[in-house]
Amino acid sequence: MSELVINNLHVSIDDKPIIKGLNLIIRQGEVHAIMGPNGTGKSTLAYTIMGHPGYEVTEGDILIDGKSILEKEADERSREGIFLAFQYPISIPGVTVANFLRTAVNAHRRHAKPPQEDISILEFRKLLKSKMDLLEMDYSFGGRYLNEGFSGGEKKRTEVLQMAVLEPAFAILDETDSGLDIDAIRIVSDGVNALKGPKTGVMVITHYQRILNYIQPEFVHIMYNGRIVESGEKDLALRLEEQGYDWIREKFGQEEIA
């Protein structure tokens, strides 16, 4: 069982500290929810794990199975088993969903140990259709240009489809519920639930408890001022739903949120 370890992580953007000593362990098969007020560093955590060059790690480490990934580029981290579903997925006109996914699959296969041959078109079509069936998606989706003209819900379902095809060891969902109505949240959550299992650890980053009605976390963590200040089970998310974050501010002081 692989584990992703975040050890005393400090991260800055343009010399401004955002994450200030964060510790977290996620194992395959576990579902963790990261909650917290706006601007407290949740998305910064996601992008830092994925290797965004605009985020500077000033202290601490990120490890997979005891090996640091800090020196690896984002594509290398992807091949190590990390997947990030973006809060605001971008459009790529002229590139179909199917071609994009086949390119990603081949990039992973070429760097596998030992390297594997590129997936054939026939084999890939079979793989893609099986994942679309799992997510109850129409096959015509694969022929559309990536995220171009997609609704918010369609963009998020495409992110989940990427997760399904790549089968990461660790999936980070950065505010997947952002901008979605309740029906779209349910559809996207059903897709995530169909994919989570013993081979995939999931980190769900969210402001609200509502998505956690569908994706049931085993662990809930509250971020405040760049740190995880509280951890617990599902009832912690329910307390936030009922009381908001005022009790967190009272307990940990009225620090300026990063």
Image: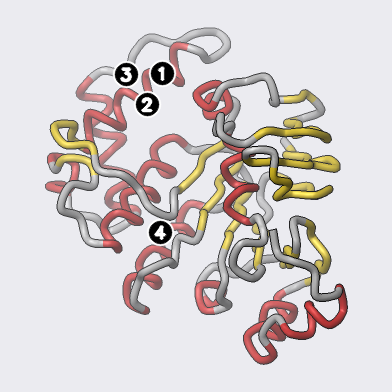
Residues under numbered marks 1 and 3 in contact, where contact means CB atoms less than 8 Å apart: no
Q: In the rendered image, which residue does mark 3 sit on?
A: 119
Q: Secondary structure at mark 3?
A: loop
Q: Is residue 206 left or right of residue 66?
A: left
Mark pair 2, 1: CA separation: 5 Å
Give the mark toward the camera: 1 or 3.
1
- Circle 1 packing at 10 Å, graded few (<14), some (14-19), many (20+), is some
Q: Amino acid at mark 4?
A: Gly
Where is 55 relative to 161, above or below?
above
Mark pair 3, 4: CA separation: 24 Å
- Circle 2 packing at 10 Å, graded few (<14), some (14-19), many (20+), is some
The earlier-in-sequence mark between 4 and 2 is 2
Q: In the rendered image, which residue does mark 4 sit on?
A: 191
The earlier-in-sequence mark between 2 and 3 is 2
- Circle 3 packing at 10 Å, graded few (<14), some (14-19), many (20+), is some
Residue 245's label in the rendered image is none
Q: Residue at x 32, y 77 (%)?
A: 183
The earlier-in-sequence mark between 4 and 1 is 1
Residues under numbered marks 3 and 4 in contact, where contact means CB atoms less than 8 Å apart: no
Counting from the top left corner in percent of width and height, residue 236 is at: 74, 78
The earlier-in-sequence mark between 1 and 3 is 1
Mark pair 4, 2: CA separation: 20 Å
Q: In the rendered image, which residue does mark 1 sit on?
A: 107
Residues under numbered marks 2 and 3 in contact, where contact means CB atoms less than 8 Å apart: no
